[in-house]
Amino acid sequence: MVHMARNMRVPPNSASLAEAKKRTLEFFRMCCRSIPEIMEIYNLYDVVSPSQLRSAVAAEVRKNSNVTDPNVIDMLLFKGMEELKNCVDHSKQRHHLVGKYVVGNQGLVQDLGHKDQGSSNFLRNFYSSNYF
Amino acid sequence: MGLGLLASRALRSSRIIRNSTRTIVSTPELKNADAAAAAAAADAPSDLPKRNPVGGARVHIPNPDDVIEVFVDGYPVKIPKGMTVLQACEVAGVDIPRFCYHSRLSIAGNCRMCLVEVEKSPKSVASCAMPALPDFVLSSNSGLVLLVLVENQLKYSHCISAEKAVYMHQTHDLQGPRMKIKTDTPIAKKAREGVMEFLLMNHPLDCPICDQGGECDLQDQSMAFGSDRGRFTEMKRSVVDKNLGPLVKTVMTRCIQCTRCVRFASEVAGVEDLGMLGRGSGEEIGTYVEKLMTSELSGNVIDICPVGALTSKPFAFKARNWELKGTESIDVTDAVGSNIRIDSRGPEVMRVVPRLNEGCPSFRADLKLDLTSTLPDINEEWISDKTRFFYDGLKRQRLNDPMIRGADGRFQAVSWRDALAIVAEVMHQIKPEEIIGVAGKLSDAESMMALKDLLNKMGSNNIFCEGNGMCPNADLRSGYIMNTSISGLEKADTFLLVGTQPRVEAAMVNARIRKTVKATNAKVGYVGPAADFNYDHEHLGTDPQTLVEIAKGSHPFSSALKNAKNPVIIVGAGVFDRDDKDAVFAAVDTIAKNNNVVRPDWNGLNVLLLNAAQAAALDLGLVPESDKCIDSAKFVYLMGADDVNLDKLPDDAFVVYQGHHGDRGVYRANVILPASAFTEKEGIYENTEGCAQITLPAVPTVGDARDDWKIVRALSEVAGVGLPYDSLGAIRSRIKTVAPNLLEVDERQPATFSTSLRPEVSQKVSATPFTPAVENFYMTDAITRASKIMAQCSALLKK
Amino acid sequence: MASVVRSIFQSIKEKGIGNFIKELKQEGYVRCLADGNLLQTKIHNIGATLVGVDKFGNKYYEKLGDTQYGRHRWVEYAQKNRYNASQVPAEWHGWLHHITDHTGDELLLLKPKRYGLEHKENFSGEGDAYIYHSKGHTLNPGQRDWTRYQTWQPTKKE
């Protein structure tokens, strides 16, 4: 696993969208295969499960599902590889992963929203933070 | 002998020569005195660029006849008579370096750092001690005769007999030129450099581990005025450190014997604890016998110490001053509202220091100068030890999550949504008249306004502020503020203190009274329990009967009051809690009437409040509908109220505690709503003299806490009685409709009507003696009670 | 060599064969058959003077005369199966490395009582419990809490 991740390299441009798609899938698989090791080296067992991490990666990939230009996909893949390599090489620290993939973009305080129907802006802001 | 050896010999010999003539003076002009003099003379005053006075000082001349003119570096300056050369220089825009001189202390003139050259004076003079003179005539051809004439009168002569001086005066035309002060001549520079070298001789080189490092006068001035090297090769002296108590750390080896602390202790604090021992190089500051410094103002020696000899013990090695962010704010631990600067690093308050009105002339005290700053003159530049050192209480015992008391009596952390929902639900199940609200001592005006509006919308009008008593008299503003104003106390000549011990209730007001007593020998009469004063006073009695006697004129003190030009009566806020308070105030009013205390040009009738929230609460009309409302209450909203007596509260009452510290109030609470402390929010506070001031957030709130008014506002919406304001600006415009004076920030708003409009009371004063309103100076509210340093102080210093 | 054999027989006679074999195991004579390093030390020990024994049981030998200079001081570790240089305490390190001629026992007298730390060997690679984790590390059981304020504890009643 380690040598695989270490030796990964993005080959030159994808010729077509199909090739780019194939590469994307390969990349996703590579990510999935690295997840157990990432769990191990960052000691993530008590905060997240492998399937949650997997869906976090999938969400990151799906975020760019509207991109059709193979060159752009290549570029995104390259950035993804870089990120993966950083994770696998222990170039990051635990809180980087926790912050980015476990807690996610929403933050720790997640506004469920369904109870606040009809309440004012003030109250909604009040529940989320003191500073508004 | 090779060439190299020759060369090195030559070099060595030349080095020896250089050593013998080695000089540390960085002003080579001095070596050529004639050239330097010529250069100085070339400074024509006519085409000089304009200079601004130091810190925007403006000269206020009370009597136009007393104006004199001096020249500072060629600039003509008009100043009132009696100013020192240093002050004249400051008006002229020249900042003279100084260590021992402090504008609010007496002049010592022993550091010699402020030496300037005065034309025709044979030696440079210490500008802090030298008065600026109208006709400064120094007549001498030989340099042996010094003769000073002021208004044609011989004031001081030196080396010659008085007859000869008078003879000289008659025979010479001595109506000479104006005093010419020179601050940047080679002589002045050399003098400073020399003084600095002497000062640094015995000063340790421990700036890297010194807490004063970065804000040290000696550091700054040695950079600006000192030499780049010293000639000192011997051992430095060392001095044993003194133990001055839990607040002031001493490293006496760093002391430069400026005696500022000695003068502060005896002149301002009123404790003759510190003194100068020994002579020459054995000279040191100390307490002579091992003794703690027992003053409520002792922390100020930390600020006035120009070096790191006296530093803050709780702050020792905690932070460097350049890491700190200063936030100018207000102290709320007593009703004075001292102007403070909260120094914080990240989320922590690291220290509290008085707001130095920097940029204002430092010698405001002698009233010769006016300030351009509009800041009210509340605490000069001193603060009490409680204000300075309570800050560690802000980090302890904090409430950080909303909590609900479960069925088993235990608290459980919940979300804001759940906590507010429960409070709102309970609130609606209870009859409006059984709902009461209590504002705490540290509440700001905004949150009190919001709480009052909320309760009124719920149909209840039972809201009050702790400390104001159950039936406060909020009708006449002059009946609960300090009408004379704190700085106005300096004009008084007789004080009558009724049931108040200003030393523990408001240390800064006490410092003012002491200053007045020291300056004008004002008389102080005191009615109340035996108390500790640091100035001469007359203990007239312990109960209100004494007041009746004074009112009748049968008491010996009444004659003193009668003869006084500006009498001042100060009634303590502890009286608010007495049953016979109306009678006491009536007696005080009678005394005031009989002795002409309230006149168009002078209002000497004062109430000294205890807490920061009191004045604003009364301004906003936080008056309960009935004084027995606690007995029948079913729902109590405590907004930071810890000292309100809840013994009579029914057991089934639902108590909501909104506050920042787990103090006395939380133990009875059913729901806890965490709020922000005054260092974490913006809020208006009105001090005892009726001056509204504003706090600014220095650090973020802890945990899940919210600002007080926001909690009330959110609760109102959850309860379905939404308050119509969403922002601080909106709530302030609501305050404007109730008490517009609260929005006049930093400006004292005097009361319009005098208390003589009060209705007659038939109540008789009781014989119960007055009780002390503050038992422990160091622990008066939730924050100070949480503070470890304050606990230490009250254990060690309280007597 | 003959003296060695003679002393072996003597000690068998004194302790009996069972005890002798037990002692052989303890002293690592059995282990040294598989561990050439230990064997070499054991052979080296013959005829050397025992200079001192530290509190862990490491023995310090010196042999002057027919030994190559620079190899005349050595240590036989107390642990025969798992030994490394970090087991030598600070006081003996100087003697062993020819930094000083004072033996560890002499230098121990100079060790400050108030702040002198106990020697601890390096446990690298010996499992999580022995790995150093910084004060902020999640795996540090005493991970530092960076909260700058103390909360009120509701359990403390009255």
Image: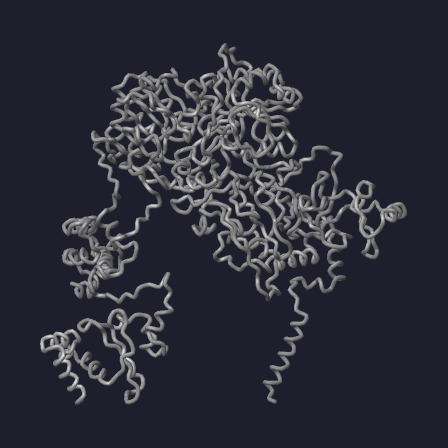
Question: In the depicted view, which residue is nearer to us: C109 or B81?
Answer: C109
Q: Is residue B105 visible?
A: yes
Image coordinates for residue B3, horizontal then vertical, percent = 60, 87
The image shows residue B112, relative to residue B78, as above or below, that is: below
Whether residue B610 sits left or right of residue B255 in the image: it is left
Q: Is residue C71 visible?
A: no
Question: In the depicted view, which residue is nearer to us: C66 or B729?
Answer: C66
Picture quadrant where residue B57 is located: top right
Residue positioned 85% across, 49% down in the render = B161
The image shows residue B394, relative to residue B756, as above or below, that is: below
Picture quadrant where residue C98 is located: bottom left
Residue positioned 61% across, 83% down in the render = B7
Question: In the depicted view, which residue is nearer to us: B113 or B373?
Answer: B113
Picture quadrant where residue A112 is located: top left
Question: In the depicted view, which residue is nearer to us: B552 or B355?
Answer: B552
Image coordinates for residue A119, horizontal then vertical, percent = 27, 28
The image shows residue B706, relative to residue A98, as above or below, that is: above
Q: Quadrant of the C terminus of chain C?
A: top left
Residue positioned 25% across, 55% down in the render = C140
Whether residue B483 sits left or right of residue B180 in the image: it is left
Whether residue B651 sits left or right of residue B263 in the image: it is left
Q: Quadrant of the N terminus of chain C?
A: bottom left
Whether residue C142 sits left or right of residue B690 in the image: it is left
Residue positioned 54% across, 24% down in the render = B527
Image coordinates for residue B532, horizontal then vertical, percent = 53, 32
